[in-house]
Image: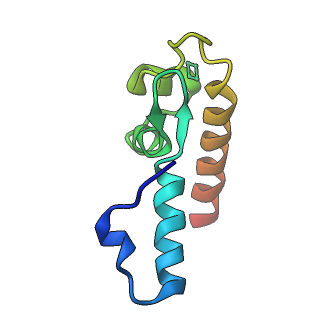
């Protein structure tokens, strides 16, 4: 269960508040369960230039837990794919 920071809970506009809540949950979703690494850390690594699963694992520390990346590897690949697609649309 996630708890929102107070700054997110006191939004006056309930629709906007829901968007803030949803975005906060999305950014803090745990991608690597073994190491407890949230989605935002992976996105930071990708923004800083990590372009492959191996580079991301090295930058963030994922893939070295009990499952050796079996659970988080596909999710990281999906994040990379999503990032590349959004970058293509931006140009
Ligand atoms: S979930 Fe990332 S190493 Fe297991």
Name the residue rendered at 55%, 28% in the picture. Answer: 33
Q: Nearer the viewer, residue 26 or 51?
A: 26
Q: Is residue 74 left or right of residue 65?
A: right
- Quadrant of res 76: top right
- Depicted 45 relative to depicted 54: above or below: below
Q: Residue furthest bottom?
A: 13
- Residue 63 position, x and y percent, is 54, 17
Of residues 69 and 36, which is closer to you in this image? 36
State which quadrant residue 68 falls in: top right
Q: Residue at x 57, y 65 (%)?
A: 90
> Who's the residue at 49% across and 22% down the image?
62
Question: In the image, 65: left or right of 75?
Answer: left
* Colouring chosen for the image of the structure: rainbow
15 left or right, relative to 13:
right
Q: Position of residue 50 (x, y in %)?
A: 46, 33
Q: Looking at the image, in which quadrant does ligand 1 appear? A: top right
């Amino acid at each position: 269960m996630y708890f929102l920071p107070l700054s997110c809970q006191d939004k006056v506009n309930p629709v906007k508040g829901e968007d803030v809540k949803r975005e906060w949950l999305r950014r803090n979703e745990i991608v690597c369960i073994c190491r407890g690494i949230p989605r935002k850390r992976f996105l930071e690594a990708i923004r800083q230039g990590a372009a492959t699963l191996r580079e991301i694992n090295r930058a963030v520390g994922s893939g070295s837990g009990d499952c050796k990346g079996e659970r988080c590897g596909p999710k990281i690949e999906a994040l990379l794919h999503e990032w590349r697609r959004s970058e293509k649309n931006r140009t």
